[in-house]
Amino acid sequence: MSKHILRGGVTTSAFVDQIDKLPPIAKDDLIRRVSGRARTELAELREEAREQGKSEGYMVGFGDGQQAGYRDGYAKGRVEAREEHGAKLAQEFETVRNALERIVREAEVAVKQWAETAEAELTDSVTHIAREALAEELSLSRDSILAIARRALNEVIGGTEVQLHVNPMDMGLVEARLNDLLQATGSVQGLVVRPNRNIEAGCRLETQAGIIDATVEGYLERIDNHLEDAA
């Protein structure tokens, strides 16, 4: 009986699959809350049916005992009480089944909401961690701007002038190594360095052909786009 307590229209396979994908802590917490609620409802329903069966059996036996004798009345009361109790049990079973179906539906919604929230929080966390890691790395080694600028310059199509936008803190270092940057790439005819407070780290190149974004912000934006596409 317990294998088929839920109606055919109530599917649990997808729900169980979702629960299995939860982290252990979230899964244990959800199971504990749902099972605790189910046990409470079942206990209340059983106690109510038991008390009703006892009360009705007593009243029937007492009434018949007054009319036809205590023993006959008691026996008759027991039979009727048993029948009444059977009907109450059937009603209890139906009530329990409805309660379990409702719990399953509510749990499915809870799992879905948890998954959506966790996914959004995970995306934010990955971006935040990447930003902190990059910021710490660049603050510890400002020389990294030279490697970033050199790599970006290598992407420039030959025979053009370039404006190199960097954070004001990186201006002195880049200007001091400007000739080294030009020698590292033979495709750039002229290179002008400009300060840009909107650039946290990295650089942005403006050429006649377009813009090359080698900023940390651009890198993090590409991470966000990748995570959204993979979701």
Image: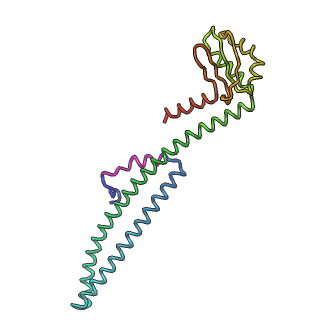
Which residues, given as a range, are shown in magenta? Answer: 9-20
Q: Is residue 159 positioned above or below 45 on the image?
A: above
**Residue 87 placed where, x, y %?**
27, 70
Q: Is residue 16 magenta?
A: yes
Q: Name, please, the residue furthest toward the top.
A: 159
Could you say where residue 55 lies in the image, as x and y percent from the top left? 33, 80
Q: Which image quarter holds the N terminus?
A: bottom left
Residue in the picture at 35% in, 49% down = 11
Magenta-colored stretch includes residue 148: no
Quarter of the rendering containing residue 75: bottom left
| Chief secondary structure of the magenta portion | helix
Residue at (58, 17) in percent of width and height? 210
Q: Residue 217, how many percent across, how many down? A: 62, 30
Q: Which residue appears farthest toward the left when viewing the image?
A: 68
Closer to us: 105 or 87: 105
Image spot of residue 35 (x, y percent): 45, 60
Q: Is residue 161 above or below residue 167?
A: above
| 172 shown above or below 183 | below
Q: Residue at x 50, y 51 (%)?
A: 27
Q: Is residue 202 left or right of residue 76?
A: right
